[in-house]
Image (cartoon, rainbow, N blue to C red):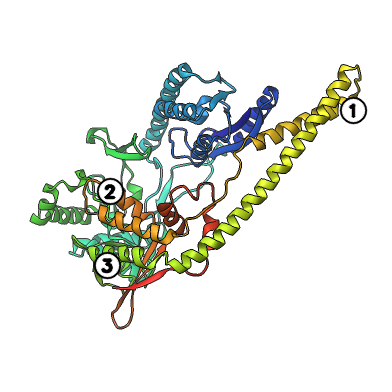
Amino acid sequence: MRAAIYSRFSSALQSEGSIEDQERLCMARAAREGWHVVARFEDRAISGASMVRPGLQALLDAAQAGKFDIVLTEALDRLSRDQADVAAIYKRLCFAGVAIVTLAEGEISELHVGLKGTMNQLFLKDLAAKTRRGLRGRVEAGRSGGGNSYGYKVVRRLGDDGMPVTGEREINPSEAQIIQRVFKEFAEGQSPKAIARRLNDERIPGPRGKLWRDTAIRGHQQRGTGLLNNELYIGKLVWNRLRYIKDPETGRRVSRQNPKEEWIITDVPELRIIDDTLWKRVKTRQGEITDTDRVQNIKATRFWEKRRHKHLLTGLLTCGCCGGGFASVGRDYVACSNARKLGTCDQRKSFQRNALETAVLDLLRTKLMQPEAVAAFVKEFTLEMNAAKGQQSDDRARLVSEQSQIKRKLEGLYDAIADGLRTTGLKDKLLALEGRLAEIETSLAEPAPSPVRLHPNLSELYRRKVEQLAESLRDPAIRPAAVDTIRGLIEAVTVNIDDAGDVTLALDGALSAMIDTSQPGVLRGVDAGSVKVVAGTGFEPVTFRL
């Protein structure tokens, strides 16, 4: 039986050496059972309450590919502590024909999934309650409940018991001056965007050493985020303003605001940076902005409740001047985010979104996958990939030959033992041959390599698919799926403007995705990096004048 070992530790509960301890115990169990360990997967310092774990996802993918027959782990809570996630993992592994065996519970069945999943879920809830109780005690003592704010530095010292003291902060004088300046400039009528741009022009580092952004200054008034809403600056430590719950669809945490009566507020006058008069001036101006017709009309649309439409080039556009990304400016236009928001780029021209999308679709259809380049690629790629496959076939043939030889030797040894010949050397040789035979049979259990055959008219197949996808964009019912597929064909789109004001687009195509779109499944099991290496001349980024 082929076995895979999965190990995980949570930084809050276990040491890093726990991974090695879990693997050692699982290896010993596999040896006792006579299982051959063919893979190991691990996640270090990642909570079991999330499915977003590289090791776990790799294990599920390998199971689906038929790489092993058993998943061996220390306990069911190593796979997950979330009841729904445990059930999902169990279903996926069962569908792949893979059993789950743990050192603590043995072979896992539906009964274990139900009972242990419930127990693990209760454990997480209890752990969260204890953690919050400890944090609340720290906050009520005037210390940090986690994280740090701009304007303060962490105090590192040892207590009377010789242990590190946690949660203490003190004012950072240089950053405190910047905070006072931001508050004064906003109270005098300057916008957060203008303030951020001026700070960047003066090369003053922002929070975490990054560039200043208007959102870091403005924040969200009701949630207490952003410099202008941080009550710590007036000597009030507010905790439990927000709670976090897991989105069952994405597995990621999302924040929800708690009722005000549940907030824990502690006075910390030693951390005050802003006086009450300046704070009130800022709050008054924020109220005036909120009461304007423009803001009220925007709020009346309740835009945050609507699922934002995903545009074709979202996150794919790059400024050729500064290398930054693009952001929406107005309803139908995009521009360099650094130029418009930070003032750190000179390329301030905006572009109509539809014009860019049309140009990129034309590039995908007419400029990429040129017939001559594709023909050369198909020839070179096929030769290289099939040469590698041929080597694998030769290796497989050698294993088959060695398997036959070992079986003949073992038959002879079995006959010798049956005739009464028993020596220490004979036993050792028998065990060594049986072990090697098990390794060979595991290797031969993998599917035999199949030749790679790219279609000779690959470029025409690709062009037709892109045209079909472009047509699909016009149908609202299937547009989202078409957008996702087309986006997968694009690595990046760089927008350049020369001295004469002419605009040029440089498109980097995702070659592996283009081939798979043209001839689905042909690259299954092929390393995408090798495709890029073989591509060579003829597949460089293409340009287009807008």
SS of the residue under disc 3: helix
Image spot of residue 125 (x, y percent): 39, 26
Q: Is residue 343 left or right of residue 300?
A: right
Q: Residue furthest bottom?
A: 500
The three-letter code of the residue at mark 3 reads Arg
Q: Which residue does the image show at 43% across and 66% down from the upper left?
A: 371
Asked if the residue under mark 2 is in contact with the one under mark 3, i.e. CB atoms within 8 Å, the reply is no
Identify the mark at residue 340; answer none if there is no mark. Answer: 3
Question: The C terminus lies in which quarter of the figure?
Answer: bottom left
Reading the image, the residue beneath label 1 is 425
Q: Is residue 309 above or below residue 97?
A: below
Q: How would you rate the neighbour count of disc 3 (Cα within 10 Å): few for under 14, some for 14-19, many for 20 or more?
A: many
Residue shown at 21%/46% (left/top)?
304
- Seen as rendered, the residue at the extreme front is 456
Amino acid carrying mark 2 in the image = Pro
Q: Nearer the viewer, residue 145 or 443?
A: 443
Q: Nearer the viewer, residue 465 or 438?
A: 465
Relative to 395, 318 lies left or right:
left
The mark nearer the N terminus, 2 or 1, is: 1
How far from the left and from the top, in percent, is residue 295?
Answer: 13, 54
Disc 1 residue type (three-letter): Gly
In this rendering, the answer to whether 423 lies above or below 149 is above
Label 2, secondary structure: give it: helix
**Real-space Cα distance between discs 1 and 3?**
80 Å
Residue 241 visible in the displayed image: no
Q: Earlier in the sequence, mark 3 or mark 2?
A: 3
Q: Picture coordinates of residue 436 (x, y %)?
A: 75, 34
Q: Dot 1: within a 10 Å radius of its alpha carbon, few (fewer than 14), some, or many (20 or more) residues?
A: few
Q: Determine contact: label 2, label 1, CB under 8 Å.
A: no
**Badge 2 is on which residue?**
480
Q: Sequence-wise, which precedes: disc 1 or disc 3? A: 3
Q: Is residue 386 above or below residue 362?
A: above
